[in-house]
């Protein structure tokens, strides 16, 4: 597509919604649910571009470099391939990826969200931008990122992953402040991942559509993901098996297939969720973030109780 054609494709685009979050399973559930209702979404003027569609593009690679603090400045031209995906009929574009402004690795949790947002806004200039940010209690988030780090093919003990000290940078209130400094507080919606347990998958999905400000979200059907599409997490046994077997596997394809096997046969669908932090470490994490979490709920999620959701 020429530059003129690209500009024409974006001419009708009015809003850009960015879905970023703190939990891979919930993110994948949302992406799978959205994939099943593309036609009803299109009828309401929304186009969805998921992580799977952009992860091999220079745009995604650049955002990952920004999140890793390798290079926080980038030219908007890296987003051309993604911009060309926008259909002329789209009025709202949803980019959905839990690590759009972050990385799965714990130490790169939303380290430079402002720089990532500046690049995204440069790729889609003069389009109103809104961010939907899902947060998670920090102890659970730490454990989840480790499991996902293993799930993506790394082989490292939890002790080495965590390092010598507990992390102090997962201050969701500060991260929300930094995002709001670019898009404005009125264009930031913050929600706790944990509400999925009370709302259920469909309720969580409906709440997401509300936050995305669809014209008529009630008309969007819902099909609850099942099987591998639900993207359940590894159990502790799956992690243990992977760490023992991975050195014996010879090719990337063997490793990929074995990870898929572990997810299908040794996930939290049938086995207990892994707990990596000791009780003492979990208590210490709670102490570190108590003040931050109290302010997070007061400023950004007053409709929820931090105690009920185990943030304090």
Image (tube, helix red, strand yellow):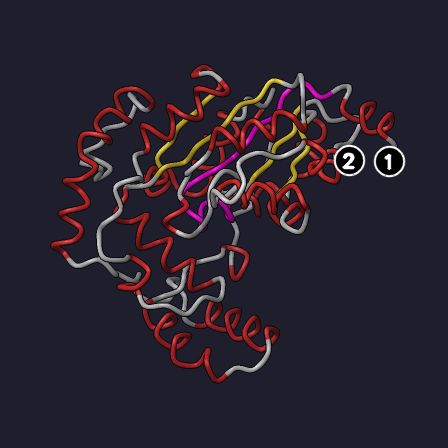
Judged from this view, the residue extending furthest toward the bottom is 248
Q: Quadrant of residue 123?
A: top right
Q: Camera-side residue: 42 or 67? A: 67
Q: Position of residue 179 (x, y in %)?
A: 44, 26
Q: Quadrant of residue 74?
A: top right
Residue 102 shown left or right of residue 49 in the figure: left
Residue 22 shown left or right of residue 187 in the figure: left
Residue 312 shown left or right of residue 192 in the figure: left
Q: Which residue is mark 2?
A: 84
Residue at 40 percent across and 64 percent down: it is 234
Q: Which residue is mark 1?
A: 1
Does 18 appear above or below 180? below
Q: Position of residue 20 (x, y in %)?
A: 48, 37
What's drawn in magenta, residue-wise? 13-29
User: Where's the C terminus, which quadrant?
Assistant: top left
**Helix, strand or loop under label 1:** loop
Does 276 appear above or below 169? below
Q: Position of residue 307 (x, y in %)?
A: 18, 34
Residue at 69 percent across and 38 percent down: it is 78
**Helix, strand or loop under label 2:** loop
Does 286 appear above or below 10? below
- The answer to the question of whether label 1 and label 2 lie on touching residues, with beta carbons closer than 8 A, is yes
Determine crowd level at label 2: few under 14, some 14-19, many 20+ residues with C-alpha closer than 10 A.
some
CA gap between label 1 and label 2 equals 7 Å
Does 174 appear above or below 104? above
User: Magenta stretch containing residue 60, yes or no?
Assistant: no
């Amino acid at each position: 597509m020429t530059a003129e054609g690209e500009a024409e494709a974006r001419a009708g685009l009015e809003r850009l919604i960015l879905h970023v979050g703190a939990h891979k399973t919930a993110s994948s559930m949302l992406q799978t649910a959205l994939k099943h209702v593309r036609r009803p979404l299109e009828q309401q003027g929304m186009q969805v571009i998921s992580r799977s569609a952009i992860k091999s593009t220079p745009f995604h690679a650049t955002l990952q470099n920004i999140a890793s603090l390798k290079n926080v400045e980038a030219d908007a031209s890296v987003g051309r391939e993604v911009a060309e995906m926008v259909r002329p009929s789209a009025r709202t574009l949803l980019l959905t990826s839990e690590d759009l402004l972050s990385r799965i690795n714990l130490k790169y949790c939303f380290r430079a969200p402002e720089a990532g947002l500046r690049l995204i806004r440069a790729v889609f200039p003069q389009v109103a931008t809104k961010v939907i940010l899902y947060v998670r209690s920090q102890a659970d988030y730490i454990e989840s990122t480790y499991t996902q780090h293993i799930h993506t093919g790394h082989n490292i003990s939890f002790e080495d992953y965590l390092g010598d000290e507990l992390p102090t940078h997962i201050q969701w209130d500060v991260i929300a402040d930094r995002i709001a400094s670019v898009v404005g507080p009125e264009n930031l919606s913050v929600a706790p991942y944990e509400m999925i347990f009370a709302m259920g998958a469909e309720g969580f999905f409906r709440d997401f559509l509300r936050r995305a400000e669809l014209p008529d979200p009630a008309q969007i059907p819902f099909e609850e993901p099942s099987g591998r599409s639900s993207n359940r997490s590894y159990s502790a046994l799956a992690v243990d098996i992977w760490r023992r077997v991975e050195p014996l596997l010879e090719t990337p394809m063997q490793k990929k297939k074995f990870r898929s096997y572990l997810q299908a046969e040794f996930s939290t669908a049938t086995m207990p969720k892994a707990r990596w932090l000791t009780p003492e470490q979990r208590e210490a994490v709670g102490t570190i973030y108590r003040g931050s979490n109290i302010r997070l709920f007061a400023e950004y999620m007053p409709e929820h109780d931090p105690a009920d959701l185990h943030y304090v």
